Image (tube, rainbow, N blue to C red):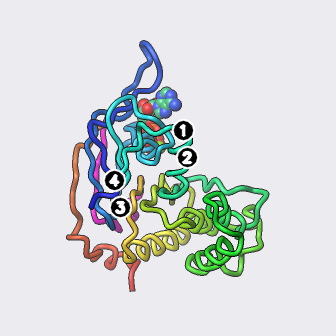
């Protein structure tokens, strides 16, 4: 089953002479459990594609499907609800809520989805433990390192057991050690069958994927399966085991 699907997906920004086709008639199928890396030069449309996939932006034309649901034609309200329940976003700049503790940041999506405080807390405890932040639960984001903030943001993205995690340059602000931590978490998610789409400039990140798509000018110019999804390349660069 495909978790994500697009048909002739197109997004144009701006008007008149400055009109840009950021995503140009893209057809994409992402099967359940796949880790897909998307690479390409600055401005080729990677973030726009991710935003369209996750319903943060509306396409100019074409279709987006999440599971069995077509999302580009949903009302704002229905789309917000679907985003909350089905999509986990991870951004380069973390986007944690500064006034909330690490644990509260991770509880928030579950609470917004209507879960009880008790359930939200239990899930947050579990996730913070998974990403190695159990002892930072009461800290504010400003009291965390960059790598810790991104791990908290990943925990938050997983709060509602999303159908897909969409990550835009998740290691773009991180040093090598913190990148290794984040890649280890992605490798664990991949092993657990989480569907992941990661936009990245980092070869190390791309090497952990099952599939690599290269974009130019809003289009896919290459689409390669990496090592039959066995993750051997990830093993070679020391991210597994
Ligand atoms: N809100 C906007 N208004 C007008 N043009 C935009 C807007 N957002 C993006 N663009 C344009 O759309 C194209 C694709 O931008 P996008 O941010 O998707 O690229 P990207 O591949 O993510 O680049 P980067 O690697 O620098 O993050 C670019 O030409 C950009 O200038
Ligand atoms: Mg971008």
Residue 217 is covered by the magenta coloring: yes
Q: Residues within 10 Å of mark 3 (few under 14, many from 20)?
A: many
Q: Are marks 2 and 4 in contact (CB under 8 Å)?
A: no
| Disc with the residue nearer the chain's start (4 vs 3) | 4
Q: Nearer the viewer, mark 3 or mark 2?
A: 2
- Visible in this render: residue 42? no
Asked if residue 66 lies left or right of residue 79, the reply is: left
* Residue wearing tag 4: 68
C-alpha separation, residue under disc 1 versus residue under disc 2:
6 Å
Q: Secondary structure at mark 3?
A: helix
C-alpha separation, residue under disc 3 versus residue under disc 2:
29 Å
C-alpha separation, residue under disc 2 versus residue under disc 4:
17 Å
Residue 238 image position (x, y, % from top left):
39, 79
* Residue wearing tag 1: 76
Residue 223 image position (x, y, % from top left):
22, 52
| Disc with the residue nearer the chain's start (1 vs 4) | 4
Residue 190 image position (x, y, % from top left):
38, 72
C-alpha separation, residue under disc 1 versus residue under disc 3:
33 Å
Q: Residue at x 67, y 80 (%)?
A: 134
Number of numbered discs on residues:
4
Q: Are marks 1 and 2 in contact (CB under 8 Å)?
A: yes
* Residue wearing tag 3: 206
* Residue wearing tag 2: 80
Q: Residue at x 34, y 30 (%)?
A: 61
Quarter containing the N terminus: bottom left
Residue 214 is covered by the magenta coloring: yes
> Looking at the image, which residue sits at the far bottom?
241
Q: Secondary structure at mark 2?
A: helix
C-alpha separation, residue under disc 1 versus residue under disc 4:
18 Å
Magenta region:
201-218
| Disc with the residue nearer the chain's start (3 vs 2) | 2
């Amino acid at each position: 089953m495909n978790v994500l699907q697009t048909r002739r997906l197109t997004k144009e920004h701006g008007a008149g002479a400055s009109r840009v086709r950021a995503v140009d008639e893209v057809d994409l199928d992402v099967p359940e459990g796949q880790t897909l890396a998307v690479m390409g030069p600055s401005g080729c449309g990677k973030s726009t594609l991710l935003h369209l996939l996750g319903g943060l932006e509306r396409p100019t034309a074409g279709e987006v499907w999440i599971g069995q649901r077509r999302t580009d034609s949903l009302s704002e309200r229905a789309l917000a609800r679907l985003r909350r329940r089905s999509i986990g976003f991870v951004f380069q700049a973390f986007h944690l809520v500064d006034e909330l503790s690490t644990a509260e940041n991770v509880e928030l999506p579950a609470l917004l989805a209507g879960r009880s405080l008790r359930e939200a807390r239990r899930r947050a405890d579990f996730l913070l433990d998974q990403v190695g932040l159990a002892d930072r639960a009461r800290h504010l984001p400003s009291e965390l390192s960059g790598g810790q903030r991104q791990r908290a943001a990943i925990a938050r993205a997983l709060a509602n057991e999303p159908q897909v995690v969409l990550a835009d340059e998740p290691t773009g602000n991180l040093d090598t050690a913190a990148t290794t931590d984040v890649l280890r978490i992605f490798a664990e998610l991949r092993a657990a069958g989480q569907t992941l789409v990661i936009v990245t400039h980092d070869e190390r990140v791309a090497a952990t994927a099952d599939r690599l798509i290269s974009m130019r000018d809003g289009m896919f110019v290459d689409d390669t399966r990496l090592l039959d999804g066995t993750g051997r390349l990830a093993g070679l660069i020391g991210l597994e085991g």
